[in-house]
Structures are given as C-alpha cells and as structure tokens.
Amino acid sequence: MKLPRLVGHRGAATHAPENTLAGIRAAREFGLEWVEFDAQLTGDGVPVLMHDDTLQRTTGDPRKIAEVPLDEVARLDAGGWFAERFREERVPTLEAATALLVELGLQANVEIKPSPGLARETAIATVSLMKRVWHATRPPPLFSCFQVEALEEAQNVWPEAPRGYLMRSLARDWQETAVRLGCLSIHLWHPGIRPDQAEAIKAAGYQLAAYTVNDAGRAARLLEMGLDCLISDDPPALAEVCGASKAA
Ligand code: G3P
Ligand code: MG
C-alpha cells in the first residue's frame, strides 16, 4: 500500500472540530483521500473518536473518558468549543465514523490512542470492530500507535491490515521493532526528523510519515528529504506543495 502525500489530521482540525464526523467530511471536501483520527475506549469499552484521556478540552466534561459510558459520552457537545456552527457535533463512535468513511470513499489512518493502562484492550476493540465493518472490497485501513503492545494486538487481530510505528523521535531500536511488528510505515514528529534518519528509514524499505505539518515551506523541505506522507491539520495550506486537490 502506498501512503498518500497528504492526510487530514484528526479530520481537518484547523477547519472543523477534531475527531468528529464534520471533520471527516471537511477532509473529503478538501479533496483528500485519507484522514487520520484517534480511537479510544469509553468506560464501557466502545471505541470512539477522542484524542485526550479526559473529555474536558473538546466537550467541557471534566471526567476521564475511561470512566464514562457511551450513552453519556454520546450526549456531549463535541463541536461548540470549536465554533458555534458545530454545536450539534457529537463524539462519534468508531462504527459511525467507519460508515462515513465508506460512504465518502475515504481511506483511514486509525491511530489507536489508549487511555493509560489500556493499550491492549483499546487495540483489540478498535481493530476487531474495523475488521468486522470494513468492506472486503477496500484495502484495509492503516493502524498506528505510539505503544508497541497495541501494535502487537493489531497484528494478531488483523494481520493483513497495515501498521505504522508512531514515535515522537526515532527510537534506537526502531528497525528491530518495525520488523517484528511487520510495519508498513514509520510516523515521526516532524520537527525532529533528520535527513540521515529519513534516508535510513527509506533505505530499510519503510514509508515515512510526519505529523503534524501545517506550514507549506516546511512541507516542501520534508518532501525534499524523502518523506512519503504529511499529516496536516490544514490540508488546503499544503495542497499545492503536495500536488493534492485543492478545496472545491
Ligand atoms: O498520528 C499522528 C498524530 O496524530 C500523533 O499525535 O497527539 O496528534 O495524536 P497526536
Ligand atoms: Mg493522532
């Protein structure tokens, strides 16, 4: 599987509230073919789209998501914090987000984002659900995670779905881990990527993705360095340098 040059981060987080269905729709409207989002478990073990381990920042509820059941999470407003016109947005279940991806013909980088101590459970629930609802005719989604145990579970549950090894900076033993986990790609925080690292990753046969790139000049330098994929909050800002479609 070849990763695209440009992926919308948390949907298209500059333009619509992160990790919502509106964010996924915004990515599609910008002409993207791929979107990244974060999957985390509610208190009753249902995968939903959420980045933080508390609900505070995006819904105003101070509780930890791992302590709140889905029926309560589903009632929260996940869009009003971003802009008044998004007040009807909810925290979507992964199942609802997947149905929308299928409807819009979008491909996904699903970041497994466990609450503390729940890496294996989150990976098993996330990957099993997507395996069940994903259409067999489409290439499987790409699962990424900072935690190796979660990628191990992703590999067990759905070995054919590609995996991305997500790191802030390149770990000393990155290659050994990537081989063991059968990874397709390495995902790094863009400010820390050195040209020699990019070269080594590419030479070892991995695709290289960078997050979160929102500046066109920086994007151009990363592409020159050999990056395959840029994950951006602001896809229209990078569309020209990435050769991607612009907003309609
Ligand atoms: O998947 C890339 C990126 O989303 C990782 O960082 O904190 O934005 O989920 P974060
Ligand atoms: Mg993420």
Image (cartoon, rainbow, N blue to C red):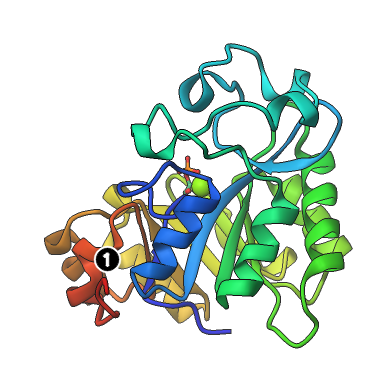
| Residue receiving disc 1 | 195
Relative to 168, does residue 31 appear above or below in the rendering?
Answer: below
Percent of width and height locating residue 3? 49, 77
Percent of width and height locating residue 56? 52, 18
Q: Tag count in the figure?
A: 1
Percent of width and height locating residue 87? 46, 33
Q: Is residue 137 left or right of residue 146?
A: right
Q: State the residue lying farthest toward the left.
A: 217
**In the image, is the residue at mark 1 within 8 Å of ligand 1 by its beta carbon?**
no
- Front residue of this view, candidates 240 and 113: 240
Which quarter of the rendering shows the N terminus?
A: bottom right
Q: Residues within 10 Å of mark 1 (few under 14, many from 20)?
A: some
Q: Is residue 127 left or right of residue 23?
A: right
Q: Residue at x 42, y 54 (%)?
A: 9
Q: Residue at x 84, y 40 (%)?
A: 121
Residue 65 position by quadrant: top right
- Front residue of this view, candidates 144 and 42: 42
- Front residue of this view, candidates 86 and 164: 86
Q: Residue at x 26, y 71 (%)?
A: 247
Q: State the residue lying farthest toward the bottom.
A: 137
Which quarter of the rendering shows the C terminus?
A: bottom left
Indicate the amino acid at tag 1. Answer: Pro
Residue 209 appears in view: no
